[in-house]
Image (cartoon, rainbow, N blue to C red):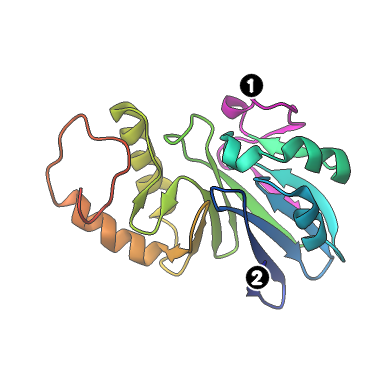
């Protein structure tokens, strides 16, 4: 566990959990002590330990893949807080959400505004969460490229989501993905510009890298 952000108003911690090294994020409003969890990969006890001293309010899901939901049932039963997800990714969950988030929805975590961005492509209901100048992006975007897409249609969809909803954010927005280390909107825009300057086959999908695909 590591504090990746510790400022006057906000603290963000990253836990790397499960054999897939999935990132779980804890966000705390330092003014009120309210907190939330983004994704529940594994080891509910470690997540609960990271919440110690705060007041959990929500569990948020970026998408429904098992490496992000492996301990969701256990975590919910112990925290007893609402689960929020997109409706398009809710049917496969073993525990149903109480809150269905749509693109542009804004809700409060203490004094912090949390903005939900619907970014389909990796899954139909993929979500990113913008909190100030920080974006918790799930598997929508990583340093160097988008998340894996199963079909060319999904790839076109994820590129549209990234270019219209993420790369339009301020350059200094910090992106925290579902696996690995973070990046910035500025860096991602530069990488995408290289990709966009080239022609690509119509069937492009899968693991795509902006600089070499």
Region rendered in magenta: 86-109
Q: How crowded is mark 2: few (under 14 residues within 10 Å), some or many (20 or more)?
A: few
Which SS type dominates the magenta stretch? Answer: loop
Q: Position of residue 72 (x, y in %)?
A: 73, 38
Q: Is residue 74 visible?
A: yes
Using the image, tell me which numbered label, if any, was put on residue 91.
Answer: 1
Q: Residue at the spot x=38%, y=55% of the render? A: 167
Q: Which of marks 2 and 1 is nearer the N terminus?
A: 2
Residue annotated with mark 2: 2
Tag nearer the camera, 2 or 1: 2
Vertical comparison of 108 with 9: above or below: above
- Marks 2/1: CA–CA distance: 33 Å
Residue nearer the viewer, 150 or 114:
150
Residue nearer the viewer, 66 or 91:
66
**Residue 151 among magenta residues:** no
Determine the image quadrant of residue 101: top right
Vertical comparison of 13 with 210: above or below: below
Q: Is mark 2 on a helix, strand or loop?
A: strand
Residue nearer the viewer, 70 or 105:
70
Using residue 186 as the reference point, say whether residue 50 is left or right of it.
right
Q: Where is residue 147 in the image (x, y as percent from the top left)?
A: 40, 44
Q: How crowded is mark 1: few (under 14 residues within 10 Å), some or many (20 or more)?
A: few
Q: Residue at the spot x=15%, y=52% of the render? A: 197
């Amino acid at each position: 566990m590591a504090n990746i952000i510790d400022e006057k108003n906000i603290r963000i911690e990253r836990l790397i959990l499960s054999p897939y090294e999935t990132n779980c994020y804890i966000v705390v409003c330092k003014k009120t002590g309210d907190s939330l969890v983004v994704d529940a990969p594994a080891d509910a006890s470690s997540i609960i330990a990271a919440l110690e001293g705060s007041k959990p309010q929500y569990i948020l899901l970026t998408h429904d893949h098992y490496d992000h939901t492996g301990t969701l049932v256990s975590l919910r039963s112990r925290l007893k807080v609402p689960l929020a997800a997109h409706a398009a990714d809710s049917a496969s969950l073993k525990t149903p959400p109480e809150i269905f988030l749509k693109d542009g929805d804004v809700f409060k975590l203490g004094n912090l505004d949390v903005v939900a961005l619907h970014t389909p492509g990796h899954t139909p209901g993929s979500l990113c969460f913008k909190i100030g100048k920080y974006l918790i992006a799930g598997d929508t975007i990583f340093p160097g490229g988008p998340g894996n897409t199963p079909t060319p249609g999904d790839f076109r969809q994820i590129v549209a989501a990234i270019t219209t909803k993420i790369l339009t954010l301020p350059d200094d927005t910090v992106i925290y993905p579902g696996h690995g280390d973070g990046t910035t909107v500025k860096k991602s825009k530069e990488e995408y510009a290289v990709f966009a300057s080239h022609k690509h086959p119509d069937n492009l999908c899968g693991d795509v890298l902006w600089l070499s695909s």
